Amino acid sequence: MKKGILYGVGVGPGDPELLTLKAQRILREADVIAVPDKGAGEKTALTIIGPLAEGKPLLYCAAPMTRDPAQLEAAYEENARRIAGLLDEGKTVSFITLGDPSIYSTYLYTHRKVRAMGHEAKLIPGVPSFCAVAAALGEGLCEGSDRLLIVPASHRDINDCLSVDANYIFMKAGREIGRLRDTLAEHGLLDRAAMVENCGMETERVFPQFAEAPADSGYFSVVVVKRDGN
């Protein structure tokens, strides 16, 4: 029996209309759709693809909200094992993931494990959240010889990043809004920062002035800093 293929499908930041034509085709052709499962709350990626999931078996894959390496490793190993079992049966699996699967995606860990097991796995690119955020702000991210630095705001101190001559994207800034705002102010960059929360979703909020964004903004908050202020 021919083995199935695993696809890591980027579904974009939130707006279903930003789902690419290729992603739609891959999802329609899939035998099973794998859905990241944090254990509680809305399944955002599943909501984005909407009708494309109707009538298809869903495989919920653990995506624990923790930084404990052992817990994360166990979850990815189990996800890979279950997906590999379906591929051995000749089924095609599409694993949906927010934004683009190559940018801070937890899917990548499962992707590598499945490939290490000898299975074929492919990435289907999606619209990155920061590109959609730039569109929501009506601004470019970089022009001419500008450099762009993308930083996961919630993972470590950002002071070293701010010494780089570049425009900045701070992703997943929700829990670090207060600290990020204070740090940008210390470096004289606060008035050059803007933020979009839940870009492309029904709960989207746009803050052209980051200083006006509430401290309780959600996890899907992206902050853009333009060094030249344009």
Image (spheres, grey):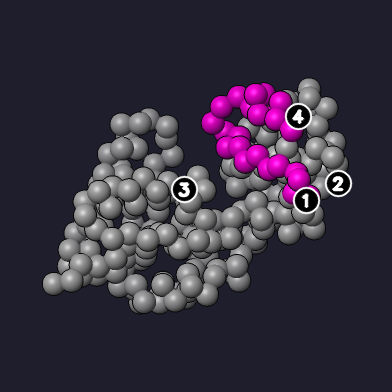
Q: Which mark's residue is nearer the viewer, 2 or 3?
A: 2
Dot 4: within a 10 Å radius of its alpha carbon, few (fewer than 14), some, or many (20 or more) residues?
many
Tell me which corner region of the image, top left, top right, bottom left or bottom right, holds residue 92. Answer: bottom left
Identify the residue under disc 1.
143
Identify the residue under disc 3.
105
Say which of 102 and 201 sits in front.
Answer: 102
Q: Type of residue at label 3?
A: Ser
Say whether residue 194 is left or right of residue 115: right
Q: Earlier in the sequence, mark 2 or mark 3?
A: 3
Q: Earlier in the sequence, mark 2 or mark 4?
A: 4
Dot 2: within a 10 Å radius of its alpha carbon, few (fewer than 14), some, or many (20 or more) residues?
few
How far across and how far down the image is residue 114, in percent? 27, 52
Magenta-colored span: 142-165
Q: Outermost residue toward the front?
A: 145
Q: Earlier in the sequence, mark 1 or mark 3?
A: 3
Q: Type of residue at label 4?
A: Leu
In three-dimensional space, the C-alpha distance between marks 1 and 3, rounded to whole angstroms, equals 27 Å
Identify the residue under disc 2.
230
Q: In the drawing, what numbered circle is on residue 217?
A: none
In three-dimensional space, the C-alpha distance between marks 2 and 4, rounded to whole angstroms, equals 17 Å
Identify the residue under disc 4.
184
Residue at the (78%, 50%) spot, across then down? 144
* Helix, strand or loop: magenta stretch: loop
Residue 138's place in the image compared with 65, above or below, is below
Q: Type of residue at label 1?
A: Glu
Q: Earlier in the sequence, mark 3 or mark 4?
A: 3
In three-dimensional space, the C-alpha distance between marks 3 and 4, rounded to whole angstroms, equals 26 Å
Q: Earlier in the sequence, mark 4 or mark 1?
A: 1
Task: Tell me whether circle 4 and circle 1 mark residues in contact (CB < 8 Å).
Answer: no
Q: Which mark's residue is nearer the viewer, 1 or 3?
A: 1
How far across and how far down the image is residue 44, in percent? 51, 57
Residue at the (28%, 47%) spot, across then down? 113
